[in-house]
Image (cartoon, rainbow, N blue to C red):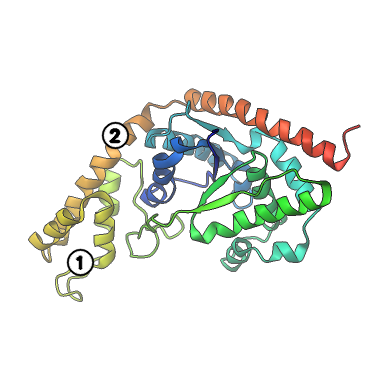
Amino acid sequence: MAAKRQFTGLQPSGKLHIGNYFGALKPFVDTYQDFESMLMVADYHTLTSLKDPKELKANIFEIVRAYVAAGVDPEKAIIFKQSDVPEHTELAWIFETLVTVPFLMQAHAYKDKVAKGLEANAGLFNYPMLMAADILLYNTDIVPVGKDQQQHVEYAREAANKFNNAYGETFAEPKEKILEGVAIVPGTDGEKMSKSYKNYIPLFGSKDEISKAVMSIVTDSSTDNGMPPPFLLAINELFAEKDKVVKRFHDNEGKYKAMKEGLIEDIEAVVAPMRAKYESITDDDVKDILKRGAEKARAIASAKMVEVRNKIGVTL
């Protein structure tokens, strides 16, 4: 029996931090070999918010390096760039002719981003149909998502249904795989770790950069009876066994500097091998990975679009 196809898209939106590692990189690394896995760098999606060409290009290189450094073998997953497969935007346009404006207005991600002050450009509004095209082009079986992203897969299923009802059975309905066990990593201030909040610990930073971030973790012995804030314990437990962390905290009660120094060493033990791998991957390596991935992805996508064009009546 053929392996099920899993599709993951990721935006090259900036420097990666340990929250990205536990929320996206590690879950993919842990499961991708169980499927025929596709890993797409969603560079066109990123244009809805990032308008700096140099930064976008740098981010693309970084995110491919990051996944390979974290343990993804490019020979065992198709790693490709969205913009290298023009069938994505072609299929997105076709889907946009099938759904209504009120339907797209229901998107949580659109409403949330606009509420946070992000420009309400048309790309952001139509985002769900490009994402549906990303998923459906490859006859995807499974899409791993966090609970807050479940609606994206629901939109893809709706796009598949709209097309199938209009033109005949063409797209299978993908299933979401909710990543229940994925940690929401707290930042140095106790809020969710985010580049936007400037409360992050860099994933591939030097030991000095990691140390500086960890030492900035907010602690206040005057208000917590000598016990560390719960989020400091949560960060520690991502990198070491709970018994080890609890012992460290009891042995150093009230001594936050010692607790943080222990955390720095635990982070370094996990990150240092990945950082060495990351730094060994050249720009040419990344270009080669993406070139080979694009060839494989386009072979699948172009075959699907031959079928789609025939169905909608544009093939003469």
Dividing the picture into quadrants, the one containing residue 162 is: bottom right
Q: Is residue 96 left or right of residue 81?
A: right
Question: So how many labels did they put on this image?
Answer: 2
Q: Nearer the viewer, residue 105 or 272?
A: 105
- Residue 101 in percent (x, y) is at 77, 63
Q: Which amino acid does the dot numbered 1 rest on?
A: Pro
Within-10-Å neighbours for mark 1: few <14, some 14–19, many 20+: some
Relative image position of residue 264 (x, y in whole percent): 22, 48
Under tag 1, what secondary structure? loop
Q: Residue at x 39, y 52 (%)?
A: 19
Classify residue 125 by image quadrant: bottom right
Residue 281: quarter of image: top left
Q: CA distance from mark 2 to mark 1?
A: 29 Å
Could you tell me which secondary element the residue under label 2 belongs to? helix
- Which residue is painted at 38% across and 55% down in the image? 181
Which residue is at a point 59% across and 68% down the rendered structure image?
115
The residue that disc 2 covers is 273
Residue 223 is left or right of residue 291, and the answer is left
* Kind of residue sitting beneath label 2: Pro
Q: Is residue 191 visible?
A: yes
Above or below for 284 versus 96: above
- The residue labelled by disc 1 is 228
